């Protein structure tokens, strides 16, 4: 296999693997009326607390223009709130609301069952190895180099 084929195959394989992984989680998200983007925002805010909007975009892998629309809808659903920083008015901070935290608690239980199914299919060690390899790929990414 040539280097070019390998590189194209890697990116395609990652996209296909994402689609396969989402087939476990999407039904749960749909059942709770949450999009995958909204869930990523909820999860990041749950893990990190109040987060600056640019950092939230980075951590949730949502482009800033798209995140603005996602947050607007989430605010309308009273899942998050946005406010300007008292220190720097250019900085917008996003916080998970009580309703958003409650939704996280409901969805998390079902998401954990999805992980259990993945673990049963792949095996605990293989799933851990896969996640470790993906972390390593992120670590060596040129976007993470200073």
Image (cartoon, helix red, strand yellow):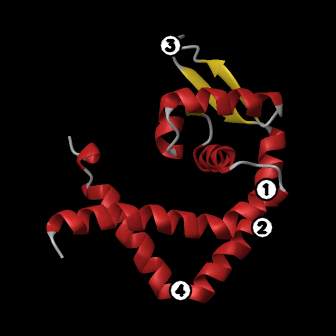
Callout 4 touching callout 2 (CB < 8 Å): no
Task: State which quarter of the image contains the C terminus.
Answer: top left
Does dot 3 land on a helix, a strand or a loop?
loop
Dot 3 or dot 2: first in sequence order is 3
For residue 73, which quarter of the picture?
top right
Mark 4 → mark 3, Cα distance in angstroms: 47 Å
Query: In this rendering, would 48 be left or right of 99?
Result: left
Which residue is identified by label 3? 88
Q: Quadrant of the N terminus?
A: bottom left
- Left-right relation of 43 to 145: right
Res 74 quadrant in image: top right
Q: Position of residue 78 (x, y in %)?
A: 82, 32
Of circles 3 and 1, the one toward us is 1
Residue at which label 4 appears: 122
Q: Residue at x 68, y 65 (%)?
A: 25
How far is disc 3 from disc 1 in space, using C-alphas? 37 Å
Q: Which mark is residue 30?
A: 1
Question: Which of the two discs, 3 and 2, sits closer to the camera?
Answer: 2
């Amino acid at each position: 296999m040539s280097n070019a084929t390998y590189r194209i195959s890697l990116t395609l394989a990652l996209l296909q693997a994402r689609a396969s992984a989402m087939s476990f989680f999407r039904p749960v998200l749909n059942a709770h009326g949450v999009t995958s983007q909204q869930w990523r925002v909820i999860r990041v805010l749950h893990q990190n607390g109040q987060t600056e909007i640019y950092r939230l975009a980075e951590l949730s892998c949502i482009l800033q223009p798209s995140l603005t629309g996602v947050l607007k809808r989430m605010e309308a659903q009273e899942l998050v709130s946005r406010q300007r920083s008292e220190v720097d008015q250019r900085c917008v901070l996003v916080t998970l609301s009580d309703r958003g935290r409650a939704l996280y608690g409901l969805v998390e239980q079902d998401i954990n069952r999805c992980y259990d199914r993945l673990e049963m299919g792949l095996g605990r060690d293989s799933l851990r190895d896969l996640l470790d390899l993906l972390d390593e790929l992120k670590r060596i990414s040129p976007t993470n180099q200073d």
